[in-house]
Amino acid sequence: GAGVSQSPSNKVTEKGKDVELRCDPISGHTALYWYRQSLGQGLEFLIYFQGNSAPDKSGLPSDRFSAERTGGSVSTLTIQRTQQEDSAVYLCASSLAPYSAGGPQETQYFGPGTRLLVL
Amino acid sequence: KNEVEQSPQNLTAQEGEFITINCSYSVGISALHWLQQHPGGGIVSLFMLSSGKKKHGRLIATINIQEKHSSLHITASHPRDSAVYICAVLNTNAGKSTFGDGTTLTVKP
């Protein structure tokens, strides 16, 4: 079946512009995660959605970042007034269920990422 | 000090060798996650565990909650195992993950 897809695969923008990144999780997956990986850096958690619950926004680096998940499926990550330090690969992952007992339902499936470059 | 520490940072092995990658953490967790990132950038989840041991093929992951330590073992390593292996701890609310810096493994034929 189809995996997690993300669009666009690459995005080049000018400093100060807004960008919107899209994630299509695997159908039926209730949990959705956004991460980013800056060049030469490790992975960083951004935000987590579980079903219809309020998202865990604790990882968003500033109020320029926001995300929504419509209808419990597609998610968009929006970065307003982009800065050069926002340049990174933005990764989305989904899982059938959030972690509970370490079963296969909690396996996170990662999308290919969106490579964002802010000039 | 990072909340999640991996060692070694880099590891080079000969094909067939037994590999061990270590992960220590300093925070309370609900689970620990091992990920594999290939040179092309794609990330694959290997294991998620909160106790004991899990095995999948040539890969084995163990965790000791009391010692706040996990290990990832690769038996009979192969050049295709060359990748960055990342340890992540899921905080107690199970949403937020904190990541180690990764271990770059190179397996030579």
Image (cartoon, rainbow, N blue to C red):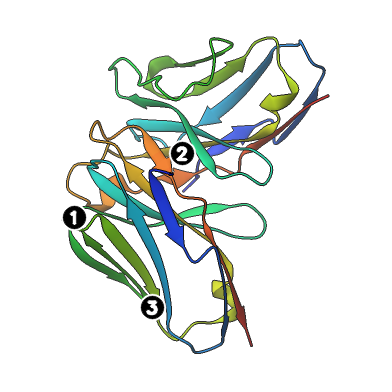
Circle 1 sits on which residue?
A: B65
Q: Residues within 10 Å of mark 1 (few under 14, many from 20)?
A: some
Q: Nearer the viewer, residue A82 or A102?
A: A82
Mark 1 vs mark 2, foreground winner is: 1
Up-down relation of residue B109 to residue A37 (above or below): below
Q: Position of residue B30 (x, y in %)?
A: 22, 42
- Badge 1 amino acid: Ile
Circle 2 sits on which residue?
A: A93
Mark 1 vs mark 3, foreground winner is: 1
Up-down relation of residue A51 to residue B62 (above or below): above
Q: Secondary structure at mark 1?
A: loop
Q: Position of residue A56 (x, y in %)?
A: 35, 21
- Badge 3 amino acid: Arg
Labels 1 and 3: the sequence-earlier one: 3
Of all chains, the one bearing label 2 is: A
Circle 3 sits on which residue?
A: B58
Up-down relation of residue B9 to residue B4 (above or below): below
Q: Position of residue A118 (x, y in %)?
A: 78, 24
Viewed as shown, does residue A83 lie left or right of B52?
A: right
Identity of the residue drawn at 28% across and 71% down: B55
